[in-house]
Image: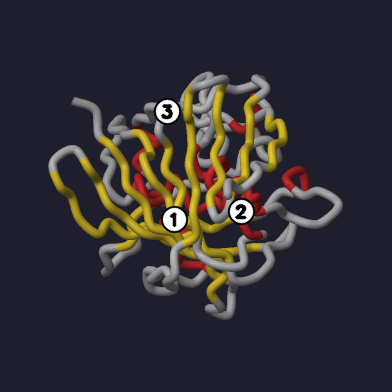
Amino acid sequence: MTTAALQTVLTVPERFRGPAAVANGGWIAGTMADALNGHRSAVEVTLHAPTPLETELRLEHVANTVTLSDGDKLLVEAFPVAEDLEAPDFVSFTDAARAEAGFPGWHGHAFPECFVCGLREPGDGLRVFPGPVEGTNLVAAGWRVPFTVADEDGVPAAIVGAALDCVTGWAHFAPGESALLGRLAVQIHRRVYAGGTYSVVGEATGRDGRKLFGRSAIYENDGALVASARATWIAPR
C-alpha cells in the first residue's frame, strides 16, 4: 500500500531572503517544521539546494516527511527527530544586547541583505546582530521582535526558525566570512510575541573540514527556553 501525498504550493516572498535571490534557511526550516507537525517536537531540515524566491514551489507531505521541490528538483527535506535539542547557556537580554557591539558584521558582512542578520531597516529585517559575550564562548544578541513579522495567529514558526539560524554561523565567522546553511534541526517550546524582547544565543560546537557545527537558543527575560536549534554549515572551498 502506498501513502497518498498531500501537496500545497509555497512561494517565499523576497523579503525573507538570506543571500541575494535565495530564501533564508532558518525561515525555510521553521516553515517546514510547522508543516510537518505544527512544531510540537524537534524537526530536522536538510537544505539540498538553495530555495528560490517568488517562485511557486511544491510542498509535499508523505507519512512523516515533508519535502519542498521546484519541479522535479528536491530543495528541502524535513523529518521529526526523537530528542530534545541541547541549548547553549542562558544569556540575559541586557548582556545579549551589550554583545551586539562586537557583531563581526559591522566590519564586513557577506550577506548584508539577509532577513535575519542583515543591515535592513527596523521593522523590515529581524536585525539579530550576534556578538561575543564577555567571559564565555557564546555569541548573543538582544532580539526586539517587530510587529511586522506577526500574523493573525502571532509570530509564526518560520520567523522563530529564522531567528535561530544565523547566530549559529556567527559563532564561527570573523568579519566578511560566510558559509551556507546545510541542515537545521528546530524545536519550539513556547510562543514568541510581537513587541517582546528575547535573547538569541549561539555557540560553536565543532568543525570537520568544511562543515561547521553550532547550536542556538531563544530565551525569555526570566531564562525560560523558548526554542532551540542545531545547525550544520558548509564553508566555501
Q: Residue at x 49, y 72 (%)?
A: 92
Asked which secondary structure carries label 1, the reply is strand
Helix, strand, or loop for circle 3?
A: loop
> Which residue is label 2 attached to?
36
Residue at label 1? 185
Q: Is residue 2 left or right of residue 98?
A: right
Residue with the mark numbered 3: 49
Q: How many marks?
A: 3
Q: Which residue: 64% across, 53% down?
A: 34
14 horizontally vs 90: left or right: right
Q: Which element carries disc 2, helix, strand or loop?
A: helix
Which numbered disc flags the more N-terminal residue, 3 or 2? Answer: 2
29 left or right of 202 in image: right
62 sits left or right of 74 in the view: right
Q: CA distance from mark 3 to mark 1?
A: 17 Å
Q: Are marks 3 and 2 in contact (CB under 8 Å)?
A: no
Give whichever of discs 3 and 1 has the lower sequence position.
Answer: 3
Please determine whether, in this image, residue 33 is positioned above or below residue 120: below
> Where is the C terminus found, in terms of image quarters?
top left
Residue beneath the point at 25% across and 34% down: 235
Image point 49% across, 54% down: which residue?
79
Residue 125 quadrant: top right
